[in-house]
Image (cartoon, helix red, strand yellow):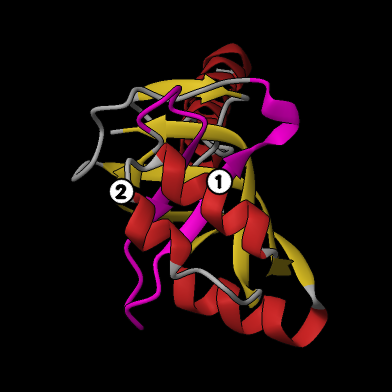
Amino acid sequence: MKRILLLSFTALFAISCNSISQKVELKGPQLVKGTTYGDSVFDNNIKSLEAVKSVAEKSGATEAKITGVVTEVCQKKGCWLKLKSADGEDLHVTFKNYAFFVPKDIAGKTVVLDGVAKIDTVSVETQRHYAEDAGKSQEEINKITTSKVKLSFEAKGVVVM
């Protein structure tokens, strides 16, 4: 009788431990699915552009993961892109250390970015360079005459979905 009780207790204990371990299984951050350029991007702590902009305006810079729709890409190399912003001022995104580029045909696609958002002064020369990369006319380029203070983003990883 003692053997039967001991075997029954052992079986019940083993079954309960197995069901507890299945319920306690923890999942960490997962890779964002899509085509990755640069470093891998994980799906934890992805924020809206507006939330990141608010933090960067207060602190000057913040590490962040954001998602958005691409409105424009550098047509020379794919060395920058712009994300659609709710306030109408698209976010200019460059790539850390010029280490990678994105395809030139991803306008309209959703991306997830991992990097640093910062408030930056963009010189006339830099604005003109970006306008030239975007294929703007010389007349449009010549209209750029003042520096701008705006939010920019340096991505260390980009996932195109």
Q: Return the residue at label 2.
A: 70
Q: Nearer the viewer, residue 44 or 55?
A: 55
Q: Is residue 32 magenta?
A: no
Where does the image place residue 67, in percent across and percent down from the top left? 40, 54
The amino acid on which the numbered mark 1 sits, given as a three-letter code, is: His
Q: Quadrant of residue 52?
A: bottom right
In the rendered image, residue 56, in percent from the top left (x then y), is placed at 70, 76
Q: CA distance from mark 2 to mark 1?
A: 19 Å
In this view of the protein, can residue 48 be seen by the observer?
A: no
- Residue 88, given in percent of the width and then of the height, sits at 32, 78
Is the C terminus in the top left, top right, bottom left or bottom right quadrant? top left
Q: Tag 1's secondary structure?
A: helix
Mark 2 or mark 1: which is in front? 1
Magenta stretch in the rendered image: 75-99
Q: Residues within 10 Å of mark 1 (few under 14, many from 20)?
A: few
Report if the CB atoms under discs 2 and 1 are less than 8 Å apart: no
| Residue 92 among magenta residues | yes
Depth order, front residue of 11/61 = 61
Residue at the spot 37% in from the left edge and 51% down from the top edge: 138
Numbered disc 2: secondary structure: strand
Query: In front here: 129 or 100?
Result: 129
Q: Residue at x 58, y 20 (%)?
A: 100
Q: Residue at x 39, y 66 (%)?
A: 90
Q: Residue at x 51, y 26 (%)?
A: 18
The numbered mark, 2 or 1, whose residue comes first in the sequence reads 2
Name the residue beneath numbered marker 1.
Answer: 129
